[in-house]
Amino acid sequence: GPSKRLLTGIVIEYFFAFGQLFLVLFANYIRTWRALTGAISLFTVPFVFFYFVLPESPRWLISQGRFNEAEKVLRRIAVDNKRDFDKDAYEQVKEEQEISMLDKHNQEGVMGLFRSKIMFIISINLFFQWLVQNLVFYGVSQNTGSWDLDPYLSFTLSALVELAAYVLVHLILDRVGRKLPYCVFAILFGLVALLVLPLQKFVPKDSYTRKVLLNSINVSLKFFASASYAIIYIYANELFPTNLRNTGMGICSMVARIGAIIGTYCNDALARIWVLLPVLLYGIVSLVAAVLALMFPETLNKPLPQTVAEAERMAMTSIRIGKPQSTITNGTEREGQSLTGNNEDIILKDQLQRNNTDDNQL
């Protein structure tokens, strides 16, 4: 259900930071990069066996019409959590999905992300957000070697700052939502990055004050980049509809790798032109991303959209760009109806039922 999405999304980031701390420990004792790469690669061996242990997502199985497999997984989850399997609730979800699958648009592949205007805007915007956040995150992270500290200490401090950012995100995201913190962190990153201009102009080059201020800027940039990175990972999962979530997240991940590659080269190539150019680039694109993120709907405590139609309805209702052309109730479309009066009550009841269904699935 909605109350569990933050935990499952942020716990991945915790292990990401812990992995960096372990990497420093290994690097401290294994000083050749070839031996270090071989040593840490051994940790990936157990993942081969996860295929035989981890169940498939029941939500995804239902979205694909594989109802018998989904029921088996849900029954197993119910047993593991010492809960009763709610057969009636499951049959209701199954019926809704069967009706929903009659619409050919709910069964589309990657093109389903671009056929409707609203879904197209959300998808392109998310791809850009992922590119930017990976550009700035890896650009800043790989620049820790330029911190005026011991390289091992710099990397350790960077990992701890990243961990602190994830803790803060974990504490606030279910209180204030997704959109506001994401935009705030992205804007703060951009503003702090631009501080390098007055720092270079007004603070003497070899002064102790300049050293302290520059390190403070570097630490702040890593903090804000880590926070934004963690939020967009959770946010994107909640914006894509279930039947296109894997496809959308896959494209986001691909675009993100492009951003990481660009960030790696920016630190070297652009710095040859002007030493401050990489940081200024990161700051500007972060500000642009923050402005574009204002177009996203808020997803806090809202059921995950199952189809493109539901994702569009959530977007149109949240950002108030107009009235939906149709409303989805129990998997069917009611053409020409507005969200007022009795229809609003019906949809509210349906949303409450869906929340209860999500909780029962857990």
Image (cartoon, rainbow, N blue to C red):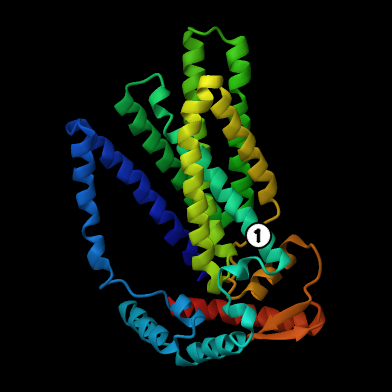
* Residue 299 visible in the displayed image: yes
* Residue 227 visible in the displayed image: no
Which percent across, then down, holds residue 49?
Answer: 23, 67
- Tell me the residue at 43%/61% (across/down): 8
Q: Nearer the viewer, residue 111 or 72?
A: 111
Q: How many marks?
A: 1
Q: Nearer the viewer, residue 329 or 146?
A: 146
Q: Nearer the viewer, residue 286 or 353?
A: 286
Mark 1 element type: helix
Q: Is residue 329 above or below residue 190?
A: below
Q: Is residue 33 above or below residue 358?
A: above
Q: Around disc 1, counting alpha carbons within 10 Å, would you say few (fewer than 14), some (14 to 19), or many (20 or more)? A: many
Which percent across, then down, holds residue 34?
Answer: 21, 37
Horizontal side of 298 relative to 78 (left or right) equals right
- Tell me the residue at 60%/41% (across/down): 186
- Tell me the residue at 47%/42% (across/down): 260
